[in-house]
Image (cartoon, rainbow, N blue to C red):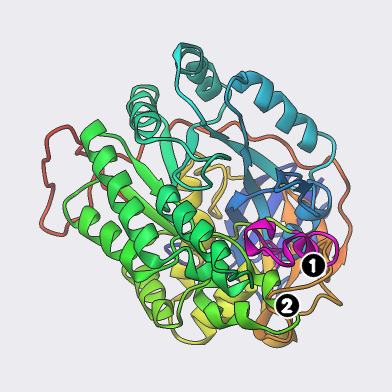
Amino acid sequence: MKTIIRGGTIVTAADIYNADIAIEGEKIVAIGQHLTDPDAEIIDASGQYVFPGGIDPHTHLDMPFGGTVTADDFVTGTKAAAFGGTTSIIDFCLSSKGQSLHDALEIWRKKAEGKALIDYGFHMMISEINEQVLAELADIVEQGISSFKVFMAYKNVFQADDETLFKTLVRAKELGAIVQVHAENGDMIDYLVNKALEEEKTEPIYHALTRPTAAEGEATGRAIELAALAGAPLYVVHVSCAEAVDKIAEARKKGIDVYGETCQQYLVLDQTALQKPDFEGAKYVWSPPLREKRNQDVLWNGLKSGILQTVGSDMCSFNFNGQKELGRGNFAKIPNGGPLIEDRLSIMYSEGVAAGRLSLNQFVDMTSTKAAKIFGLFPQKGTIAIGSDADLVLFDPSVTRTISAQTHHMNVDYNPFEGMEVQGEVITVLSRGTCIIRNKTFVGKEGHGKYVKRHKYSMYGNTPATGPVHLPGTYTGLQMI
């Protein structure tokens, strides 16, 4: 099938220009002025931006947690992603101690195969390091999973010790993979949570108060030091506060290969949401928690300056009724996570570009291109170029819409951004050349999404404007993105 997208303004991480895009099969085959083909379907993009499909590097679909399972699976979650302009996700494959990584991966493959509406990949969680895991990791990378996740929090559930983190970093360096960390000091948090409960402080706000910014800053700094010692790259997920941004900024200035991801919820919501009456604050319980409003400017500045590179959603949805309510009387039992996948691009465009905080190129870079480069999807995805997958989003910047659970497509009974008015709207979405959203109407099908085998990590380098900083045990060479 041939398609021509005509009359739109193409925006990539580097360029903005007016041109037509010709698609044949799953790929972009031509970009130019006044393209014609009598056999092609014409999609009119006049007055619209044409963005590369969004890449969400941080999702949790069909995931068990806290005695329940997320409300969105790979059908509903990827459908909501598509409506929001996301055409690829990288979901977290959880593993447990004593479990083969291959067995864990097979479980996650079955969750997605034949269900996902958009393309997907996996990060592999590492809960322990032993000879079996070390041996398996080589094959995991060969299967296209070039990123490993280590939790420094959730004591007695997901939390790994420093030895596990360090050995994972060393092995990742050997295999050409990148390690991600959930950076919070789980031991400190466990003590503070137990202390609060002993004092009968049980409301949702105590979820935030027992996970202070110091816990995130300390863990971020510790992970960076271990990565530098191992000479391995590090990616810090869902950065939420100034203390963590400062640690990343300091490390990048030294030439250490570290990247930072934040999420749209930390940019527009704050800690006061957890104080909503009638247990409504439970809707906003996720980790790291929402922070005091002062952190928002630091995060925006981090994105604008390049200290932070990506924006993920940390999609991990639980219904308020029947799931979040499990924590009534004990905030520690509230399932951590929120329905966040659908509104990522809208909020980042509205509060970033339309509000004057970010350029159009920066918006594309942090919602698509940087994730593609860091996680081995570029140039297949993350850009608009001849030979790239025809993952495209037609976006009308002239209209406004109001976010609401009444109109969203996530399988959950609330939206944390309820009532927020955003500038701009996703109109049409193509995944590998096939329309899955047409004029704001779903026209895709279950199983269209394919597993994407990712390249090994190759962005070793540094950022200082003064040139390379050579530290013992660290890589230098290619320019860090």
Q: Nearer the viewer, residue 134 or 361?
A: 134
The residue indicated by pointer 2 is 280
Point out the tag, 1 or 2, that comes first from the N-terminus.
2
- The circle on residue 203 is none
Residue at disc 1, secondary structure: loop
State how far apart marks 1 and 2 are (Cα): 8 Å
The residue indicated by pointer 1 is 320
Residue 171 visible within the image: yes
Whether residue 256 is situated above or below residue 363 in the rendered picture: above
* Residue stretch in magenta: 318-342
Q: Quadrant of residue 49?
A: bottom right
Q: Nearer the viewer, residue 458 or 19?
A: 458
Near mark 2 (Cα within 10 A), the count class, few <14, some 14-19 or many ≥20, is some
The residue positioned 28% from the left and 52% from the top of the image is 221
Residue 270 visible within the image: no
**x, y (%) of residue 237?**
47, 53
Whether residue 202 is situated above or below residue 176 in the rendered picture: below
Whether residue 137 is situated above or below residue 405 in the rendered picture: above
Residue at disc 2, secondary structure: helix
Whether residue 137 is situated above or below residue 66 in the rendered picture: above
